[in-house]
Image (cartoon, rainbow, N blue to C red):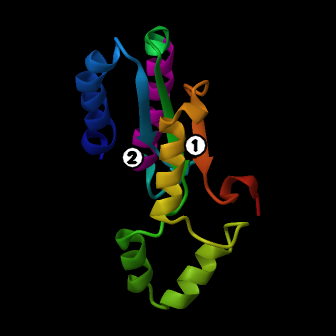
Amino acid sequence: MHTVNLKGVYLGCKAAIPHLVHGGGSLIFIASVLGIVGDGDLAAYGAAKGGLRAMCRSIAVAYGPQQIRCNTICPGDVRTEIFDEYIERAADPQAELTRLLGFYPLGRIASPRDVARTAVFLASDDSAYITGTDLVLDGGLLGKVY
């Protein structure tokens, strides 16, 4: 879990940053809302994603003077093949999908396109003064208590 989700990103940054120090750039990590809140069944995953958030801030501080920005996207559920497989394995797939949708005030699960558009924004000059932050992309999920 940590090798892929944290160490892999660290090694990618270690390789990329030397190429960015003379011209700047934007590093974008994909974390998760589970790097912000806890899930008793996914502790290792949440710890790795929380580590990405901390690494992002450290990179933003260390390399800001070289005009390297670093930000993290923290999505909730995303409608991917893995998500769909999870739903299909449920005893009652429609009931499980309805249950999950009930957690999201916007009433839908994010699409990969939602995540991609957020990444494009963070890579663009439209976000030129944003660094060291988490952009929570969760359809309002973390805004709800009950």
In the rendered image, the vertical position of residue 123 relative to residue 21, given as above or below: below
As shown in the figure, which amino acid type bears the numbered disc 2?
Answer: Ala
Residue interval drawn in magenta: 44-61
Query: Is 47 included in the stretch rendered in magenta?
Result: yes
- Answer whether labels 2 and 1 touch (C-beta < 8 Å): no
Q: Based on the displayed image, in which of its 4 quarters is residue 62 positioned?
A: top left
Q: Give the image location of residue 146, x and y in percent.
A: 77, 64
In the rendered image, the vertical position of residue 43 relative to residue 27, given as above or below: below
Query: Would residue 138 be found to the left or right of residue 113 on screen?
Result: right
In the rendered image, the vertical position of residue 143 relative to residue 8, given as above or below: below
Asked whether 129 or 85 is in front, the reply is 129
Asked whether 131 or 32 is in front, the reply is 131
Other-residue count near label 2 (Cα within 10 Å), few / some / many at <14 / 14–19 / ≥20: some
Q: Give the image location of residue 80, x and y in percent.
A: 40, 69
The answer to whether one can see residue 81 in this image is yes
Residue where numbered disc 2 is placed: 44
| Residue at (41% x, 19% y) in the render | 24
Q: Which label lies toward us, 2 or 1?
A: 1
Query: Is 4 included in the stretch rendered in magenta?
Result: no
Q: CA distance from mark 2 to mark 1?
A: 13 Å
Query: Would residue 25 be found to the left or right of residue 137 on screen?
Result: left
Other-residue count near label 1 (Cα within 10 Å), few / some / many at <14 / 14–19 / ≥20: some
Q: Based on the displayed image, in which of its 4 quarters is residue 98 positioned?
A: bottom right
Residue 46 has which mark?
Answer: none
Please identify the dominant SS of the magenta region: helix
As shown in the figure, which amino acid type bears the numbered disc 1?
Answer: Ile
Q: Secondary structure at mark 1?
A: loop
Residue where numbered disc 1 is placed: 36
